Image: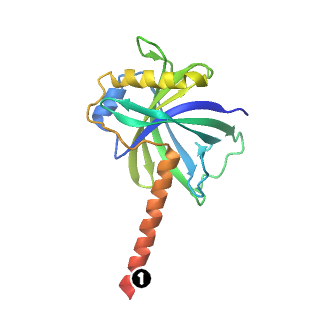
Amino acid sequence: MLGSSRLEVRWIATGSVPPSTAEWFARFPSRSEEREDIYLVLPQLPNLAVKIRGGEALDIKEFRGTRGVLELSGIGQGRLESWRKWSYSFGNHSPSREEPPGWRRVTKRRRLTAFLPDEDALVPALQVPAELLVCSVELSEVAVDEAQWWTLAFESTGPEERLQEAIEATACRIAGTQAPAHLDLSLSGPYSEWLTKLERSRRIDRLWRQAGGRLGEA
């Protein structure tokens, strides 16, 4: 399989989607979905992101480097990251729903929209052939264990030489449609990087509590 190229930027913030952000996103035609993905967090695989998507497929993404910084007035700035993605369906042989050691389950409530690149307007493109140049926009609430987060992401797919053009044009036009001025998002990066940081924090916290317990017994 050759895989597919994509360029993306993702911001992740704590808590629930702010009401003004949800109202802003509702201006665009979108579809909703809920699913659980399980991500490999340990061991770390250099430049690879691996997940079981909704119990239906194994997704593998290879990091191909950054393509600069996307700056959006009123929203924030984030790294434009280039990826190559392969997806393998499990067919009738779905994996166990248990969370294996080293993997982390993420529950997602997603709202998705997509647009064709256009100089004058946002042209909706929720259902288009995979080979066309398109930029998807995602607003989601996610849960890891009992912690709540939300994420805003842009992802362009199609001819590789035009991916940056598509994501920059769409993101800038989206940001200009009365986007909430208070967002000021700063934590950008893929799910895999974010989850690895969470896992490290959990391990440090667990070791700290264990050390504290021994000190209390001394």
Q: Residue at x 53, y 54 (%)?
A: 104
Tell which of 103 and 193 is nearer to you: 193
Q: Which residue is mark 1?
A: 214
Residue occupying the point 42% across, 31% down: 70
Q: Is residue 81 visible?
A: yes
Residue 140: name its quadrant: top left
Counting every numbered tag in the picture gives 1
Q: Position of residue 191 (x, y in %)?
A: 50, 45
Q: Position of residue 184 (x, y in %)?
A: 30, 37
Residue at the location (59% across, 19% down)?
A: 132
Q: Is residue 10 above or below residue 38?
A: above
In the rendered image, residue 48, in percent from the top left (x then y), is placed at: 61, 46
Quadrant hosting residue 201: bottom left
Count neighbours of disc 1 (C-alpha within 10 A) and say few if under 14, some if 14 to 19, many if 20 or more: few
* Residue 158 seen in this snapshot: no
* Residue extending furthest toward the front: 68
Question: In which quadrant is the C terminus drawn?
Answer: bottom left
Residue 73: percent from the left, percent from the top?
31, 29
Amino acid under label 1? Arg
